[in-house]
Image: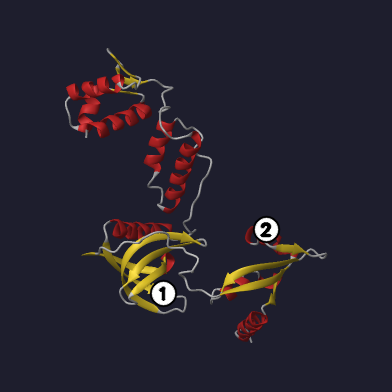
Amino acid sequence: MQINRMFEIIYILLDKKNVTARELAEKFEVSSRTIYRDIETLSSAGIPVYMTKGKGGGISILDEFVLNKAVLTEEEKSDILSSLQAVGAINFNETDSALQKLGSLFGENNSDWIEVDFSSWYNSEKESKSFNDIKSAILSNKIMSFTYSSGKGERTTREVEPLKLCFKGMARYLYAYCTLRQDFRFFKLSRIKDIVVTDKHFHRKVMGPIFKADNMFNEQYITLKLKLSPHMAFRVYDEFDKYTKEVDGSFITETIYPMGEWLFPYIASFGSHCEVLEPFDIRNSIKEEIQKMLNNYL
């Protein structure tokens, strides 16, 4: 407890620069004498804390102090701060306090070089609540239930043992053991509704990485070849690694995509600026879907 209190005192001094023994005593619910002993211990350990008397006096720490004796390299410190910022992006800014404390301890003033936000442009508050409910269930090993909409539009009630929150392919997933299917499953967070965290506990653990080469999503992949007009240049540069530019300014792209009902909406998002070249069965399927859309306007 004393060690934790002394670290917290350092955090406070780095943040406020000057604080009285009485203020610290009230915060930690100890006597002022105990605070003085903590300051003496810190000072003897080489931490440059000092006390001044009189009006405006109190306990302070040298402005230039940082934990230079830490075993972390500068690169490791930067990686830790950057990782916390990335975690904060999916944890909805709950890591701000840790970032401030570690930034002060490491003496880092350039930890704000990256900003990431994985939340959608809409329903961010609802996403935040769902994320935190699931996080709570995972950390407390509590079974949870929810309604889930599959990619085929089927709605089912699931009871699961939540094991891990994942982020892959620009989407968040819950990896859990589903009691309905009696197997491990990935659930897309955007399709999870009506979450209830029960009082029932589970003891199952997830061992090792879950995104493996054997592809736990069990998806079938195809090589998709598209012709995109020059108007889609910005998307070509954003979304494709393999492409060639034709004389007329159009692009021929080739990439691997998982099969699924989402494929047509993705291709349709290019509008009239896209032509599917291969595979031919996908090309024909797209033609059929476009014709069905046209029939709605006859």
Mark 2 to mark 1 CA distance (whole Å): 33 Å
- Do we see residue 232 in this rendering? yes
For badge 1, the amino acid type reads Ser
Which badge, 2 or 1, is on the more N-terminal residue? 1
Quarter holding residue 290: bottom right
Given residues 109 and 222, the one toward you in this image is: 222
Rendered-image quadrant of the N terminus: top left
Amino acid at dot 2: Tyr
Residue linked to disc 1: 149
Question: In the rendered view, would you say 85 is above or below 288?
Answer: above
Display colour scheme: secondary structure
Helix, strand or loop at disc 2? helix
Q: Quadrant of residue 134?
A: bottom left
Q: Would you say 240 lies left or right of 150 here?
A: right
Q: Which is more toward the observer, 270 or 295?
A: 270
Q: Secondary structure at mark 1?
A: strand
How packed mark 1 is, by other alpha carbons closer than 10 Å (few <14, some 14-19, many 20 or more), is: some
The number of discs equals: 2
Asked where in the image residue 142 lies, by quadrant, the reply is bottom left
Residue at 71 percent of width and 60 percent of height: 233
- Kindly identify the residue that appears in the image at 39 percent across and 45 percent down: 95
Rendered position, 52 above or below 41: above
Verify CB contact (< 8 Å) between mark 2 and mark 1: no
Q: Position of residue 254 (x, y in %)?
A: 68, 68
Of labels 2 and 1, the one closer to you: 2
Report whether 143 appears left or right of 65. left
Q: In x, y percent, where is residue 213?
A: 50, 66
Q: Categorize mark 2 by other alpha carbons within 10 Å: few (<14), some (14-19), many (20+).
A: few
Residue 31: x %, y % from top left: 16, 26
Which percent across, then down, holds residue 26?
Answer: 20, 30
- The circle on residue 237 is 2
Quadrant assignment for the C terminus: bottom right
